[in-house]
Amino acid sequence: MIAMSKSKICGSIFAACTMVVLLSGCGLFKGAGSSSNKPTPPPVVTKPATEEKKKDESKKETKAAPFNVPAFGRQEKKEAYNIALFTPLYLDSVFINSTELPGRTLPRYVLPGLDFYEGAQLALDSLQQQGVKLNVTVYDSKSRANSIETLTKGKQLDSTDLIIAAVGTPELQELSNVAREKEINLVSATYPNDGGITANPFLLITNSMLKTHGEALQRYLQESFANKNILFFHRNSAFEKRLLADFKADYEKLQSSRKSRIREVLWSDATTDAELSQFMLADRPNLCVVAALDEAGAKAILRKLSVQTASYPLQVYGMPTWDIMKFKEPEFKGMQIYYTSPYFNDKTDVYSRYITDYFKRVYKSRPSDMAFKGFELTWYFVKQLSANGVYFNGSVNDPAKKVFSNFNYQPVYLKEGTEQPDYFENKNIYIIQKGDSSDTKMNFQ
């Protein structure tokens, strides 16, 4: 069940908005926690300003354009920056006919977007206390009354300096069109896909795509083990066959004297232990890459592989979707299970402790990963604005602004010979080992 304080807060927001789902960044979801009850933040928290007019004294200076994008060559610093935050709050669905919350609890589908907002809000509070001047508007990406099309027609995004969006399709495509036309940097915070977008160098994809995970895993396996037997396990589906094809293509492109051939293993529920053992070697690590994104499929092949651990040294490398899976079954005990992720947070740093303490005090619960992502990306990119201005793209990979994860945004060119990137994608991938109580980062990036 969701804490009642959070439900009441959401209800009061809806009443205040009078059916208009456009929220300004001023602590809207924080009615249950006054400033006197907040934990000591890193640094002290205050509330962000709701309004600041765009200053005529904005500084603009043209330099060499990185990545052949003319806008990236402009140094444009401002007195205050205008930020649009898009996250799915589903207020139209939650409050259908009144400002009262049905059942007095929030539906669970609301929580990811709400937690992302809460994390972003905490970052904004602290940044503004540091003297960063911001005009922040939060939009419910699932609003019917204030759809992205409506906002675009009303020119409500025209003066925006940065868009941070925890959205999928079709909202990402719609926001991309705005960002490209208005030359606004758009941070796609959570969607692991390009949504078919091309020719938009203002798009920064943070949650790396599967192909990028495969490239990073290929490099890690080939370079980390001198002797190894690399096996790629897939079912007879078009999707998993495509993952295999990409993995083999990564092998061909990899320039390394230590690389070993990839051996394909087609498996099904009917595959026997004897059939699997034919692929195993006793004198070296058997590195088993599993293409299953679904939990049922992942656990089905793990059960089969668990039988082989008594006779062969074996490690299993799964997909990024494995980060939320729990492998507590007795047959998995002692298995070395890994997955890939563009995010890593061991939750021991000062920011994590601040976020955790805040959620415990206000909501009597632990923050989700979405709250940490909201905080991290908002902090990182507002710091970029503050230090480098609107077009920070030439120095987007600044380790000094790191919060939890390292980011490595690289240009992606979908067609050979094009001068401008189609978008930028975070290429930093962590290899993470599943643990009983916590996960462990294996590659030190």
Image (cartoon, grey):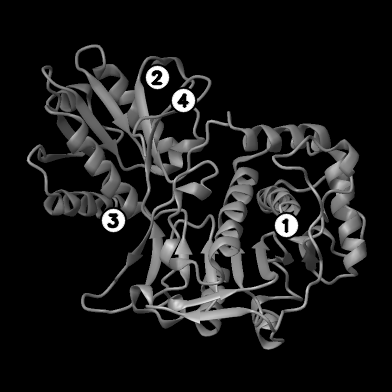
Residue type at numbered disc 3: Ala
**What's the distance in space between the residues labelled 4 and 2, CA to CA?**
6 Å
Foreground mark, 4 or 3, reads 4
Looking at the image, is mark 1 or mark 4 earlier in the sequence? 1
Q: Which mark is residue 189?
A: none
Q: Position of residue 89 (x, y in %)?
A: 72, 58
Q: In the rendered image, which residue does mark 3 sit on?
A: 238
Foreground mark, 1 or 3, reads 1
Residue type at numbered disc 2: Phe
Residue drawn where x is 67% and y is 88% of the image:
153
Q: Are marks 2 and 1 in contact (CB under 8 Å)?
A: no
> Mark 2: which secondary structure?
helix
Q: Are marks 4 and 2 in contact (CB under 8 Å)?
A: yes
Q: In the rendered image, which residue does mark 4 sit on?
A: 327
Q: Nearer the viewer, residue 268 or 387?
A: 387
The image quarter containing residue 314 is top left
Looking at the image, is mark 4 or mark 3 earlier in the sequence? 3
Q: In the rendered image, which residue does mark 2 sit on?
A: 332
* Mark 1 neighbour class, 10 Å CA radius: few under 14, some 14 to 19, many 20 or more: few
Q: In the rendered image, which residue does mark 1 sit on?
A: 131
Residue drawn where x is 37% and y is 78% of the image:
64
| Quadrant in the picture for the N terminus | top right
Q: Is residue 383 left or right of residue 128?
A: left
The image quarter containing residue 14 is bottom right
